[in-house]
């Protein structure tokens, strides 16, 4: 079933190793990093919005207290 | 009347936000499954290509990335048309959430195309119709993102960006055919990707990888649209409720 | 319908005539850019003949880009754009008039001066005729497509750079067929096919672009 | 004749007003009041059809202005806070060009007459860039002298005018109302319009 004879063959890709693994490597990197960046953005956005919300509610409280 | 109501309910950010959140793990899971199956078939099982040797295996990401880069642009144009026609809030957010992923797909397509072209054609870059059109598609993505980023008002950004997408969709085929014609006139069709006798396993590997890329794009776009929603609707009650429920 | 278009053309031409420096500087830009190329690549006539169509066309694209940001910006700043949008005609017709006026003061002068510049590149007289014809036929499309970009970037920070980013990729077919027509004539293949495609592009963009620009202007005026 | 029904205005993320109704008949003037940022200019831009309302509808002669398009705009005269005049053109050319583009018949004599009324006699042929701010405003207002369209929408028309000009403009507006015209305007000043019914609408 498996086409390759050895792991070294697999890595060498019949002499095209650099090109094949260069393609797959960068693609894997992009597809790993993009979700991480998006998730981090989501987190910082939520944190920032919560800060704003708290600041607003504090301002409201002060206004009603006066 | 009832259908209409349901559609608007679905299209309202307050309903869509939790729905998207629930769907993301699902899409990630099928993307990983398809990816593993596709890589297994493509990288381990599929035989070599007698013309191109093992270098052809780049096809398993190059072609899916190219497909996705074009497909995402079409989907964005579809959302743009919906947004301009029905003035729905969600459509502009969807288009904006898809754009960076589409641009990355175009970039992957160009990168892998270059790494494929070097051993096959002896050059990192040739002015082939497909490569050139892909490059222009990347420019169109960048133009869209730059335009929407430059407009402060979110609704106006959606509309202007949507219009640009529709203009782009009309232009992409014109650009493709003009480049193709120009290319054949200049150098003859020396560059030819003969994929006529593609083995069954190769085809399946490619299709599975395409599914993986598709599901990945949906998952990332959903993640991104959730952030955009919170940002845009930060003064609404539902966002306040979400924020209060978050991270206790 | 024709009346409103001619009224807009008349107004814009009158304005352009009161501000001739703009037309002249775009033309000088074209002349200077084209003249720089032989200095950069060397004086071999064969090489220059080969490069001439591309150089002239790229310079024409850039010269058109130079005048595009002002297409709507002046009217927007002084409030006349609002009045144009409120005139009892479809805004697309008004934009058609403005596009034609823009071509008359930016594209037409380029076509008139192009043969002179072609001589610098040692083009044959036949190629010069085709070059002039191609620029005459192609530049209206540049004004039309450019109007969409100008309308989309109206009133934005860094609008000029953004405008080139949006518009230049859309100019590629015009560039290919415009330069191709001259190229085909130089190499003896005949440029008719290219010229007719160029004409088709121009007609399509003149029909379509004003309405897309009008939609973009309405978004900008909200 | 001009009706607003349940209008809602959202700018950026702020709701400026909602549920706004009014009705305006011939001979009536609607004076919009409200602090800065209350949405006066936004409401005017909705009335001229450039800003689509978030909710609600504006009707002219019983039909939605959105459906009427050009027919509505043919009845409408708008004066914004920008003068809408070209610096390179002379006052006379500006007036004629504006009328021409709006599809109105305005003879040269009428235009000269209008410019005389706003106190620009002898400056008809001087490019507008040589005029003062107040004079440029007068060129813009000169459009109203011969204006026959029934609905006037005026954004701060009295700003930067001297006392005499304020009285003159009030007279022009009341003449318009007397002929059965309608007007909607915003102003911060207290202005006495001698004729017609003046109604007030406070936003915010």
Image: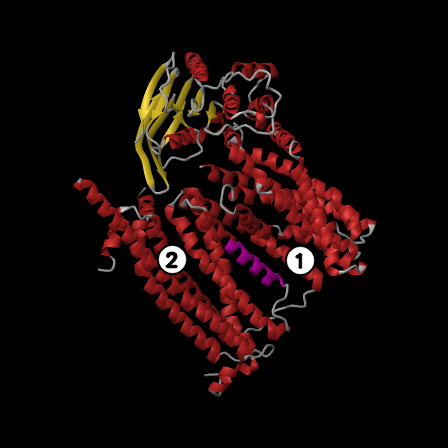
Q: Are marks 2 and 1 in contact (CB under 8 Å)?
A: no
Residue bearing mark 2 = B224
Is D98 rendered above or below residue C66? above
The kind of secondary structure element at disc 2 is helix
Q: Nearer the viewer, mark 2 or mark 1?
A: 2
Quadrant showing the C terminus of chain B: bottom left
Quadrant showing the N terminus of chain B: top left
Does residue D129 appear in the picture of this structure? Answer: yes
Mark 2 vs mark 1, CA separation in Å: 38 Å
Image location of residue C35, percent across then percent down: 74, 52
Outermost residue toward the left in this view: A65
Residue bearing mark 1 = B181
Outermost residue toward the right in this view: C125
Is B25 rendered above or below residue B228? below
Q: Residue at x 59, y 77 (%)?
A: B52
In the depicted view, which residue is nearer to us: B184 or D29? D29
Packing grade of label 2 (10 A; few <14, some 14-19, many >=20) is many
Image location of residue C21, percent across then percent down: 66, 37
Packing grade of label 1 (10 A; few <14, some 14-19, many >=20) is some
Does residue C103 appear in the picture of this structure? Answer: no
> How many marks do you count on the picture?
2
Q: Which residues are magenta?
A: B128-142
Q: Residue at x 35, y 34 (%)?
A: D37
Is B2 rendered above or below residue B132? above
Q: Main secondary structure of the magenta part?
A: helix
Magenta-colored stretch includes residue B136: yes
Q: Residue at x 36, y 59 (%)?
A: A41
Question: Mark 1 — on which chain does it sit?
Answer: B
């Amino acid at each position: 079933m498996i086409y390759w004879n050895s792991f070294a063959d697999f890595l060498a890709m019949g002499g095209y190793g650099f090109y094949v693994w260069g393609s797959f490597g960068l693609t894997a990197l992009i597809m790993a990093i993009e979700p991480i960046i998006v998730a981090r953005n989501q987190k910082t956005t939520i944190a920032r919005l919560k800060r704003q919300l708290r600041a607003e509610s504090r301002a409201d409280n002060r206004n009603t207290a006066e | 009347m009832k259908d209409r109501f349901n559609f608007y309910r679905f299209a309202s950010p307050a309903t869509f936000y939790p729905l998207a959140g629930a769907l993301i793990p699902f899409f990630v899971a099928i993307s990983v499954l398809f990816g593993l199956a596709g890589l297994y078939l493509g990288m381990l099982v599929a035989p070599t290509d007698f013309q191109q040797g093992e270098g052809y295996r780049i096809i398993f990401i190059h072609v899916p990335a190219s497909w996705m880069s074009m497909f995402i642009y079409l989907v964005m144009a579809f959302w743009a048309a919906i947004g301009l026609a029905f003035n729905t809030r969600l459509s502009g957010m969807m288009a904006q959430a898809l754009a960076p992923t589409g641009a990355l797909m175009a970039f992957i397509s160009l990168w892998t195309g270059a790494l494929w072209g070097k051993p096959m054609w002896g050059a990192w870059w040739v002015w082939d119709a497909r490569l050139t059109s892909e490059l222009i598609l990347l420019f169109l993505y960048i133009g869209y993102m730059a335009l929407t980023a430059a407009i402060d008002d979110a609704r106006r950004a959606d509309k202007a960006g949507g219009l640009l997408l529709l203009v782009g969709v009309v232009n992409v085929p014109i650009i493709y055919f003009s480049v193709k014609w120009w290319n054949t006139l200049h150098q003859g069709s020396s560059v030819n990707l003969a994929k006529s006798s593609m083995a069954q396993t190769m085809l399946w590997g490619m299709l599975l990888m395409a599914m993986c890329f598709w599901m990945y794009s949906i998952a990332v776009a959903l993640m991104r649209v959730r952030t955009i929603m919170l940002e845009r609707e930060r003064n609404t009650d539902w966002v306040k409720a979400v924020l209060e429920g978050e991270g206790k | 319908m024709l009346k409103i278009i001619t009224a807009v053309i008349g107004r814009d031409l009158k304005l352009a005539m009161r501000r001739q420096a703009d037309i002249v500087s775009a033309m000088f830009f074209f002349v200077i850019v084209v003249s720089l190329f032989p200095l950069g690549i060397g004086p071999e006539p064969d090489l220059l003949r080969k490069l001439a169509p591309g150089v002239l066309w790229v310079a024409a694209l850039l010269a058109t880009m130079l005048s595009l940001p002002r297409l709507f910006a002046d009217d927007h700043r002084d409030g006349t754009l609002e009045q144009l949008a409120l005139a009892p005609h479809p805004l697309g017709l008004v934009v058609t008039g403005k596009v034609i006026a823009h071509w008359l003061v930016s594209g037409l002068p380029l076509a008139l001066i192009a043969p002179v510049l072609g001589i610098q590149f040692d083009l044959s007289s036949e190629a010069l005729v085709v070059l002039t014809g191609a620029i005459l036929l192609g530049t209206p499309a540049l004004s039309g497509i450019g109007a969409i970009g100008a309308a989309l970037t109206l009133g934005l920070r860094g609008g000029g750079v953004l405008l080139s980013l949006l518009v230049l990729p859309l100019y590629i077919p015009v560039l290919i067929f415009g330069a191709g027509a001259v190229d085909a004539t130089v190499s003896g293949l005949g440029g008719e096919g290219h010229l007719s495609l160029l004409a088709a592009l121009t007609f399509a963009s003149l029909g379509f672009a004003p309405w897309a620009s009008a939609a973009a202007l309405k978004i900008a005026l909200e | 004749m001009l009706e607003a029904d349940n209008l809602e205005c959202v700018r950026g993320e702020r709701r400026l007003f909602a549920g706004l109704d009014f009705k305006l008949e011939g001979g009536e003037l609607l004076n919009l009041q409200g602090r800065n940022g209350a949405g006066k200019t936004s409401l005017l831009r909705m009335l001229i059809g450039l800003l689509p309302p978030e909710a609600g509808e504006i009707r002219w002669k019983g039909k939605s202005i959105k459906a009427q398009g050009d027919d509505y705009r043919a009845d409408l005269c708008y004066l914004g806070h920008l003068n809408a005049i070209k610096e390179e053109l002379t006052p006379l050319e500006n007036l004629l060009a504006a009328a021409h583009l709006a599809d109105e018949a305005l003879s040269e004599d009428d235009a000269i007459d209008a410019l005389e009324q706003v106190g620009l006699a002898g400056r008809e042929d001087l490019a507008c860039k040589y005029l003062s701010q107040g004079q440029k405003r007068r060129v813009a207002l000169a459009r109203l002298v011969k204006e026959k369209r029934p609905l006037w929408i005026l954004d701060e028309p009295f700003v930067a005018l001297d006392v005499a000009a304020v009285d003159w403009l009030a007279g022009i507006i009341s003449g318009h109302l007397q002929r059965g015209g309608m007007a909607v305007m915003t102003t911060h000043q207290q202005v006495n319009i001698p004729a017609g019914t003046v109604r007030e609408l406070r936003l915010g």
